[in-house]
Amino acid sequence: MDRFIEQAAVVRRAEAELLHQLAELDKDGAPVEFGYCGSAATLAQDVLRISRAEARRMAERARVLFGALGISGEPLSPDLPNTAEAYSRGEVGVEHVDRIRTFAAELPAEVLIGDAWPIAEKALAEIAGEVGPHGLVRPIRELRARLDPDGHPPNDHEPVRPDREIWFRQHANQWEIRGRLDYETGLKLRSVLDALGKPRSSEANGGTPDTRTPTERDADAFAEIVQLAANPENLPENGGEPFTIMVTMTEASLREGIGHATTMDGTTIPATQLRRIACDAGIVPTVLGSAGEVLDMGCRDRTAPPKLRRRLIARDHGCAHPDYDHQPALTQAHHIHHHANGGPTTEENMVLLCAHHHRMIHHTEWQVRIHNGKPEFTPPEYRRGIRFANAEPQRLLRSS
């Protein structure tokens, strides 16, 4: 452990020395001498072969930690001399530096040249040597209240709208999505995709390795985000109705899972896919005339009302399949005896499944029943005899 800690300190000291050298090169005019247009960031980008964004961050860290030259050539003192010393000793890392640097950049110029800032910056450097980067949040908040109690002066400018756009187009039975997100939203989406798009184990993937590419895992994770948002309890209503798909097909086709349904815009959906969607959706039976006119429309029959869903969550705790453990918010309520075939909307006929295992139950030989009040799964023939040691009692795989 001592060697591990010392090695981390060595890395930090080397990072600090690299920034110190960049600051000295900038002061000596190296960027101009070697044709980098006077920019330390451009020099670092080319010489170190790093991205423009990282080069800019390096140049800014070098300036605030070790000083720079003014426009007229006069030396400018560093804003964070105590942080620079702690960094050079290997006591703090780059994340500590960036948090303190960001805080300093948000303060008015008169605060940084006053008598209070050196004391505050020294205190932050000492705290940073004892806590992780997140541990600076509260001290920075308290110092901001003391150093800049009035905050930024008000202005008449409208808030800047985040730079994000999405293009969403339909091609036959698929959709194409392109766009861009602002930095904060992109970070949040990336973290959610990483959490939901981890490779599945062989057991969770039906006994075969997960061969999905990273982009395919991202797409599956995005589909789960949509499923979560499309939950009627989470989605804002549209004209008094939550998420709704209107399709046309015969009752017999829906019951047998044969043929295709037609949406209002003419798109077709396979009956098997519609049966899966209808497992956890509302169905409004509608009678059409020979010319396509609506003769009668029944009442919306929501197949998983909130009270029933809460009971299912209490029983299944999420995806009930023995190979997986998705949280309840990312599950769908599956009718064991399908609703289109007269299956009742009751706790004894429903089970919570994630989207992956919902598709598996509908399109493979996996079967599920409620036995002694708990879901029990029967695998395809090639999976018979497999049990999962970590499965909870109510999720044991039936081997016969």
Image (cartoon, rainbow, N blue to C red):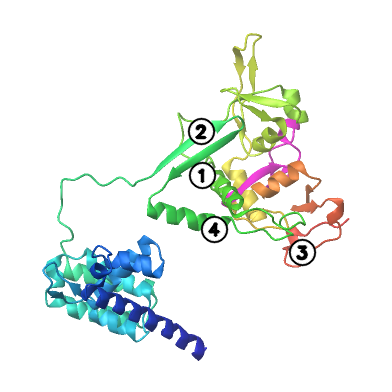
**Type of amino acid under label 1:** Ala
Choose mark 3 or mark 2, whichever is in front: 2
Residue occupied by mark 2: 169
Q: Earlier in the sequence, mark 2 or mark 4?
A: 2
Q: Residue at x 81, y 46 (%)?
A: 365
Residue 236 percent across, percent down from the top left? 45, 38
Q: Are marks 2 and 1 in contact (CB under 8 Å)?
A: no
157 vs 384, nearest the viewer: 157
Residue visible at 28% across and 79% down? Answer: 83
Question: Which mark, residue 194?
Answer: 4
Looking at the picture, how far across and down is residue 85, in whole percent?
28, 84
Give the Cα distance between marks 2 and 4. 25 Å
**Residue annotated with mark 1:** 229
Amino acid bearing label 4 = Asp
Residue 54 vertical placement versus 171 (above, below): below
* Three-letter residue code for mark 3: Phe
- The quadrant holding residue 298 is top right
* Label 1 with label 4: CB-CB less than 8 Å: no
- Which residue of the protein is positioned furthest toward the right in this rendering? 400
Closer to the chain start, of discs 3 and 2, is 2
Q: State the CA–CA distance, disc 1 to disc 4.
A: 18 Å
Q: Find out whether the residues at labels 4 and 3 contact each other: C-beta distance under 8 Å.
A: no
User: For numbered disc 1, what is the local secondary structure?
Assistant: helix
Drawn side of residue 50 relative to residue 370, left or right: left
- 53 in relation to 142, above or below: above
Viewer-closest of 361 and 20: 20
Q: Amino acid at mark 2?
A: Arg
**What is the secondary structure assignment of the residue under circle 2?**
strand
